[in-house]
Amino acid sequence: MTTPGPTSPPPLDHEHFLRLAFAVARRSLEGGSHPFGAILVGPDGSVLMEQENAFQPDHDMTGHAERVLMTRASKAYEPGFLRGCTMYTSAEPCAMCSGAAYWAGIGRVVYGLGEHEMKAITGDHPENPTLDLPCRIVFAAGQRPIEVIGPMLVEEATALHDGVWGEG
């Protein structure tokens, strides 16, 4: 009889967790803010944190869901732990949010809508002057790898923005 060795956690269901991030984005829109949401998932598949966009009520232009989530995560967890975690986000992290993810120590990012598509949707809206800079480029400039998966579920991610941005 052999003794079983250590087991790896089951693989994460990226579509499931991405849809949870979409639900956070919908809740953000229902609460009067922009339709962006992000969640932090631990190595074991548990949802550790979730974050709506934080533009409202103070018009914080840096209040992106991903940046705020990474700030909270870096205060709550060590980078060594965060390397085993995944951030799921409704849209690709912008350069600012990618930097926050890098500095927090996250190991993987999974996103819905790509930054290039986001820019096409928002145009030059003053509340979202989108940077068309892929997070992969920001991460590649760093000293440690961050796995990136996305875009995924693009139609669902795009639908979150239906009728939101209009004329800037």
Image (cartoon, grey):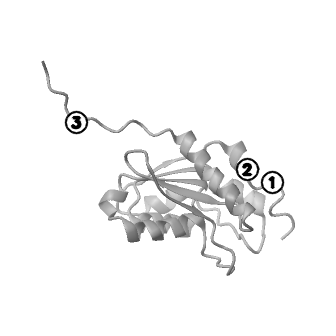
Residue at 81%, 54% (x, y): give it: 162
Q: Is residue 154 above or below residue 118?
A: above
Seen in the image, is 136 located left or right of residue 159?
left
Q: Whole-percent x and y of residue 79?
A: 33, 63
Q: Local crowd at mark 1 within 10 Å, few (<14), some, or many (≥20)?
A: few
Q: Whole-percent x and y of residue 4?
A: 19, 28
Q: Whole-percent x and y of residue 149?
A: 52, 46
3D distance between C-alphas at marks 1 and 3 = 46 Å
Residue 118 showing in the rendered view: yes
Label 2 vs label 3, nearer the camera: 3
Kindly identify which residue carries mark 3: 6
Residue closest to the eye, 165 or 29: 29
Residue 151 showing in the rendered view: no
**For the residue labelled by badge 3, is the local secondary structure a helix, a strand or a loop?**
loop
What amino acid type is highlighted by mark number 3?
A: Pro
3D distance between C-alphas at marks 1 and 2 = 7 Å
Tell me whether the residue at label 1 lies in contact with that at label 2, contact meaning CB atoms closer than 8 angstroms. Answer: yes
Residue at 68%, 62% (x, y): give it: 28
What amino acid type is highlighted by mark number 2?
A: Thr
Kindly identify which residue carries mark 1: 162
Residue at 58%, 47% (x, y): give it: 18
Kindly identify which residue carries mark 2: 158
The part of the image, by quadrant, that contains residue 53 is bottom right
Q: Is residue 61 above or below residue 46?
A: below
The residue positioned farthest toward the top in the image shown: 1
Tell me whether the residue at label 2 lies in contact with that at label 3, contact meaning CB atoms closer than 8 angstroms. Answer: no
Residue closest to the eye, 43 or 119: 43
**For the residue labelled by badge 2, is the local secondary structure a helix, a strand or a loop?**
helix
**Quadrant (top left/top right/bottom left/bottom right) for the C terminus:** bottom right
What amino acid type is highlighted by mark number 1?
A: Asp
